[in-house]
Amino acid sequence: MIDTDELPAAGNGLLDRRVFLRAGFLGGAALMTAKASAVERAAWMKNPGEGMSESGAPSAHESHLVRAPIGSQRGTTGSGASRSPLQFLDGIITPSRLHFERHHSGIPDIDPAQHKLTIHGLVDRPLSFDVDALARYPTVSRIQFLECSGNSGAALAPEPVQGNCAQLHGLVAASEWGGVPLSVLLDECGVNPAGKWIVADGADAAMMSRSVPMDKIMDDAIVALYQNGERLRPSNGYPMRLFLPGWEGNACVKWLRTIKVLDQPAMTKDETSKYSDLQDDGVAKLFSFPMGVKSVITSPSPGLSMQGAGIYQISGIAWSGTGRIRRVEISADRGQSWADAALDEHVLPKSLTRFRSAWKWSGGPAVILSRATDEDGRVQPSREAVLTGRSSAAFYHYNGIQAWAVGEDGEINNVYA
Ligand SMILES: Nc1nc2c(c(=O)[nH]1)N[C@H]1C(S)=C(S)[C@@H](COP(=O)(O)O)O[C@H]1N2
Ligand SMILES: [Mo]
């Protein structure tokens, strides 16, 4: 057993990340609240259990593990969003059933036998591909995040909005996305040298439509067919969607139907009146594609109350739309002092990275924060820095530092640090 008091890393009880990095420390650091007890045979050991089933479901004891809250625009059923329950998840993969949803006109019921992707415009040979045709092309799969550019928009409110981590930040998720590189399909069609952009359309009633520069398309864009090893879920674009690693979710057109090669952007509704960034000088910045470097502590977080003073694990997710996460720092004293968190093994580009720190909570009031840095040296900004130069009407692309206040009663609240 080690004396955790010998491993301080920053103010107000933050412990050195070696607690996580060295097995010896982990075993002895009393992170677990194990109790001595007699080993009894539980009721479920006395008879054979349930049989097999064709498809698994979560334990009945995990009924809180749902996409919530679900919000639809007034007068609609399918225009709105549901959110990933980040506060209950660990690791970096979001189970497909809990991947957040954002639809502008509901989920179309697409028969894959009747659906095609057509590539046309400035190409030598316009071509159409159905699912079976696509599945015969070389496929790639990568674990990457998808984030709505409206995620964390609540942090723009003048006073901190109270809600759990899902409510405040649950429009981000990560999956293993599998599909065909769009560069392969465009090469089949033969892109005319004047083709500098594409515009992608979806087969939903909203016909979501976004322009994407050719460089990104040729770099790492895919037509995704698979999500976490199975075909896409209907809510996430079945049978095929555009997936642009690290770029704003809105441009990842679901239920992908056409790609038209153009010499300039199409200037669609969703890249001009929406998903643009209005500045305080009245100019709206268009095409803010890569999502900024960001992190959030998912545990402890609002709704997960602390059970008395002692050692806790601070855990969360960090991501950057341009590459890998290099570092995550944690503060337990409102940002006066910081210590590096341990990063889980999988630190992948344009993915979620799980971080962890050990914290000896005194039982007194504390404010905990996380701050991510990516491999290009970009540091997650403060809320104040994000707001500087923005119009008060601006809504998208918020990546400021999130602070949680831990009260003496063990309750956790959203605060501005
Ligand atoms: N066709 C179509 N594509 C779409 C949308 C849509 O409503 N229709 N919503 C977009 C938005 S705003 C986001 S954030 C992502 C959400 O993807 P998800 O529902 O798989 O999480 O899809 C994008 N692609
Ligand atoms: Mo979005």
Image (cartoon, rainbow, N blue to C red):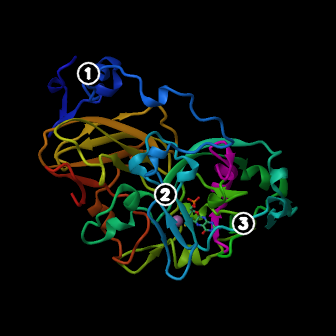
Q: Quadrant of residue 117?
A: bottom right
Q: Nearer the viewer, residue 130 or 72?
A: 72
Q: Nearer the viewer, residue 281 or 147?
A: 147
Up-down: is 267 above or below 347? below
Q: Which residue is mark 2?
A: 67
Write the residue at 24% across / 29% down: 16
Up-down: is 38 above or below 118? above
Q: Quadrant of residue 112?
A: bottom right
Q: Which residue is mark 3?
A: 109
Mark-to-mark CA distance, 3 and 2: 21 Å
| Amino acid on which the number 1 mark rests in the picture | Ala
- Whole-percent x, y for residue 60 in the image: 49, 46
Q: Is residue 133 left or right of residue 243?
A: right
- Comparing marks 3 and 1, which lies closer to the viewer? 1
| Amino acid on which the number 3 mark rests in the picture | Asp
Q: Which residue is mark 1?
A: 36
| Image quadrant in which the C terminus is located | bottom left
Please report the bounds of the magenta region as a residue range.
207-232
Residue 122 at least partly seen = no
